[in-house]
Amino acid sequence: QVAELLGCIPPLLLLLLACGLDHMLFTMLSIIQQHSFVQYSFHSSHHLSIQVTGTSLMARLLRTTIGALNTSSDTQLETSNLGCLPQPQGMTRPQYLQSFLPLAVLLLLCLAQVYTHRLRRAIAAFYFPKREKSRVLYLYNKLLRQRQSFIRRQQRRIARRAQQHPDLGVALVQWCCQRWPSLRRWRRRSCLVCGAPESSHGRVCPVPTCAATFCGLCW
């Protein structure tokens, strides 16, 4: 189960990296959009009027011909570069949740894998009871062998430690504790087998020359 959970770490890191890059890119484009916006405003107007006075034939002809040149215009133009700027759209919270949803389902499947394996074993035991009995006996014998080998290994370890000569300071403390047993409560001791600190459930070897300390489980 731990291996499956560790296997989910690379997809999680990749997803976090992708979300971080997406947020960073959105921030950069938003800054570009805000600080690169330029708006142009153009306003122009002109009036052209030609007046021809007189009542002669030439004056009337000129008024008819040149009068078409009289124009008047008023131009006002506003434009900007908004169409050329990027239009970033950040991911919303539901979209982030949807991105992390497959990974969450994967984690749940990894956690539920133990129960599916148990269910598989129960189904197999229901249809093949003899095979299940053989499997249980094999596991039981294996645990017994491991326990026996552990006991023998710890016995050899304790024997090797007993053969080693303690330091002068340790030997002096042990001699004082043997000489005055009331000093043992001031001595900080640990289990000889597993090294756990001494507790109220610990046991002390009844042999006067030993006085080794064991925790309740190792005793």
Image (spheres, rainbow, N blue to C red):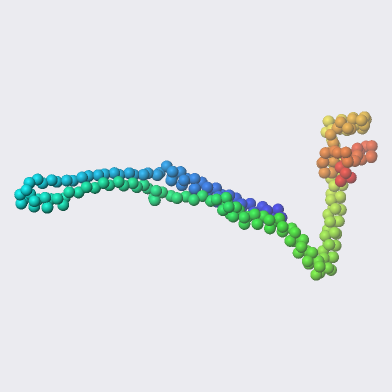
Q: Indicate the quadrant containing the N terminus: top left, top right, bottom left or bottom right.
A: bottom right
Residue 215 found in image quarter: top right
Whether 64 is drawn above or below 209: the answer is below
Give the x, y percent position of residue 49. Answer: 17, 46
The total number of labels drawn is 0
Q: In the rendering, at what x and y percent does residue 86 appear?
A: 43, 49
Which residue is at 82% across, 64% downward?
A: 135
In the displayed structure, does residue 88 sit left or right of residue 60? right
Percent across and percent down for residue 204 are 91, 39
Residue 72: x, y in percent?
22, 47
Q: Residue at x 10, y 46 (%)?
A: 52
Above or below, comparing residue 196 to residue 6 in the picture: above
From the viewer's side, name the closer residue of 213 and 130.
130
Image quadrant where one finds the C terminus: top right
Q: Is residue 36 left or right of residue 125?
A: left
Q: Residue furthest front?
A: 55
Q: Residue furthest bottom?
A: 127
Residue at the spot x=83%, y=54% of the render?
Answer: 146
Q: Is residue 5 left or right of residue 22?
A: right
Nearer the observer, 186 or 63: 63
Q: Residue sitting at 83 percent across and 68 percent down? A: 129
Q: Is residue 67 above or below residue 205?
A: below
Quadrant of res 205: top right
Asked if residue 105 can be seen in this view, the reply is: yes
Q: Which of the 4 image quarters holds residue 218?
A: top right
Task: Kindly tell me whether residue 163 is visible in this rendering.
Answer: no
